[in-house]
Amino acid sequence: MDILFILIPLSVALALLILGALGWAVWRGQFEGVDAEGERILHSD
Amino acid sequence: MPFDTASTDPGCAPEAPAGDWLALDDPQEWAGFSRPVRDREGWQESYLAIQGMHCAACALTVEQALAHLPGVDGVQVNGASATARVTWSPAVSRPSQWLAALRRAGYGAVPAGDLVDAVARLKEQRLLLWRWLVAGFCMMQVMMYAWPAYVAEPGEITPDIASLLRWASWVLTLPVVLFSCWPFFSAALRDLRHRTVGMDVPVALGIAIAFGASTAATFDPAGVLGAEVWFDSVTMFVFFLLSGRLLEQRLRDRTAGSLEALMRRLPQTIERQRADGSFERVPVRRLAARDLIRVLPGEVVPADGQVLEGETRVDESLLTGESRPLRRGAGQPVIAGSQNLDGVVLVRVERAGGDTRFAGIVALMEQASVEKPRLARIADRIATPFLLAVLAAAAGAAAWWWAGGPAHALGVAVAVLIVTCPCALSLATPAATLAAAGALARQGVLVRRLQALESCAVVDTVVFDKTGTLTHDRMGVSATRVRAGVDADEALALAASLARHSLHPASRAIAAVAGNAGWTAAEVAELAGRGVQGRVAAPDGALSRGLRLGSAGFCEAPAGAAQAGRPAAHLADESGWLASFELDEALRPDAAAAVAALQAQGLQVRLLSGDGDGAVQRLARRAGIAQAHGDCSPEDKLDRIRRLQEGGQRVVMVGDGVNDGPVLARADVSVAMGDAVPLAQARSDFVVLGGQLRAVSALLAHARRTRRIVRQNLAWAAAYNAICVPLAVAGWMPPWLAGLGMAASSLLVVANSARLARIADVGGQEAAAGPPPLAARQPA
């Protein structure tokens, strides 16, 4: 069970990293036109 | 591009005259919808409302159309609000180039100056979303750390692992408490500074105590507070609380959004006639009364005025909810904000800028949206004693349980603080009325006093005024008599071809009812006091006959062509009398249907009018109203309303808004038909914009639905508190359950209220709760 002493702090660090990524996405306005993003991949440009 | 729906659908492209675009290149004009980009010297960002967007794929097409232009650096299109933000350099690019590019892609656009000011609101939205995401994500992670403590057998988790899990939970709860909870803490501090107790005080206190006790347990598991932590409860409570706020914010923004869409309707420029008869493009702001302007197809009428030349159809749907295009010819009024669909018209401006009906509507909506319903004010008043009682109960419960261990006592106190949070109670009324008012506004009913929605739900009698309410304030043709062998419709069309050249009320009535069969009149002369005469040619130009339209004597009408005592107009050709048109006040086309709908709702319908009793009774029969009273002076009307009210009836008065001022004020609820008078002067609780009487029955039905939902909300919130508070005080409710219950009850109230954003449409079909139709609508 000693592995938990690494894994749990790692999971905390990962969670904080993901929070940062979410914040970046929010302030880039990515949640303000959510429908368009799904269609973007279908477009050939 | 197989998914490019825009370019395959020509209906996407609204017509916009190119002159408008060039006017936007003037720095003074684009300053209205642009602002300098921070930290980028020489760059601007501008906001456009895109017309003709109806799907997510459209957003991408718009983006691509703009992104490749020289001098345009970034484009963000919001599909939901149909707006685009363009980052561009004035040194290289010009707004007219984007609009041209958009036009090639099949879209129209108007500058959305309001979005420049809405930046603060966007920031607020993003901040709340970010707080919510932090709370939600941390909640998930903290739950995972808490999971072993719930499922493991005693002794199965070694103390060092348990302590590690507590530490990890603490680290992830910290951002929730410090960042996500900031709105609660700052509101609580503000309340305390003002020496009041608001809803956020117990919430903030509950969070602070729970987090503080858990922190102590984390750092010192052997201490007086024991090793029990509530990180999972705290994060979950905050997450659900923020979910409620997020929903409430969305609801509010949607209502504000309808208002802003209204404001975007005015074009920036219009063609104004110079003294020498030529036209120049001037900004709409510079228009004044008595200016002559030319409105091209696709343009939005910039001011209230009267058509002098030309004929067209206009779309007033956004202003009035009337979805059909309306025909407008010489002598007829056009209102600011309506869209000219298919003809070129010369319009004489009567009111511009802040004096227009359009400006009145905007002002009314602003006024209504800041008002607080009576129930909400009562809730505010009782909130303080209630919250003080909550604090006392929490302190009392903690003191009572202190002997059984401080940790348990604090847990009980936290549960009481959280579970009694009257969020649901305080949301119950405003969330419902706001949603209902927004839905009604989209149907062409403006709510001037939000609290009137409450009274509206209990009325049992509807009293109509006649002129301007049940009827249009102009006349209509009620009967036609013709010479043997003449077709009545053809006679009407012939008469209309002459009538269009006259402004006499009778002429206007005939011109309004007749379709345009293609007859054209020439050599028209109006003989004062007698009528109009001229030569009328068939559509193919072959047949031309001299016609006269006017009084009985002028047209040699035989006796009995029209009933005595009724207004009539007559038509004659070279061989004498041709037809007679009996005129009457035109009943609104949906009057009978509206009256029937009201009666079907179990309401008593009455008609009160100052006009002659005979005419009133006749009209009442046509509208299906059994109880009608004519010859009423204003005092009589007031008296009758008072007698009805003394008989225990609740009365809604539907009038034209100005002439019936005192009567409207006397009634329990007043509704004004907004097409008859200047809106700003209307003294009523509601204003029906489209002249659609059916909106009255829709309004009453929706008000009853609103009341039902408010009651459901209140009943649910009260029952929840009544059940949960004793449980929490008795110590039977752990903090996590309290948090879940409180949050669930708030969410339920908001979600229940959101049902009111949908309304059974005046025409009968269900209308979507989305933003109102923009200028994107096309002529059929």
Image: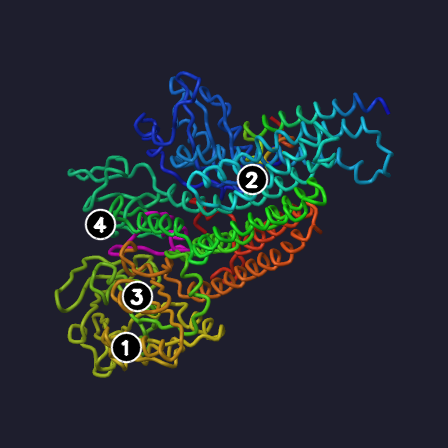
B6 in relation to A20, above or below: below
- The secondary structure type at the circle numbered 1 is helix
Q: Are marks 3 and 4 in contact (CB under 8 Å)?
A: no
Q: Are marks 2 and 1 on the same chain?
A: yes
Kindly identify which residue carries mark 2.
B204
The residue that label 4 is drawn on is: B350
Looking at marks 1 and 4 on the same chain, the residue that comes earlier in the sequence is marked by 4
Q: Amino acid at mark 3?
A: Ala
Residue B612, how many percent across, how many down? 24, 79
What is the secondary structure assignment of the residue under circle 3?
A: helix
Q: CA distance from mark 2 to mark 1?
A: 55 Å
Q: Which residue is disc 1 drawn over?
A: B639
Dot 2 or dot 4: first in sequence order is 2
Earlier-in-chain disc, 3 versus 4: 4
Of B748 and A26, nearer the camera is: B748
- Assign a secondary structure to mark 4: strand
Dot 2 or dot 1: first in sequence order is 2
**CB of mark 2 within 8 Å of CB of mark 1?**
no
Secondary structure state at the residue bearing disc 2: helix
**For the residues carrying marks 3 and 4, which lies nearer the camera in this image?**
3
Instruction: Same chain for labels 2 and 4? Say yes or no.
Output: yes
Q: CA distance from mark 3 to mark 4?
A: 30 Å
Magenta residues span B314-342
| Residue B665, label in figure | 3
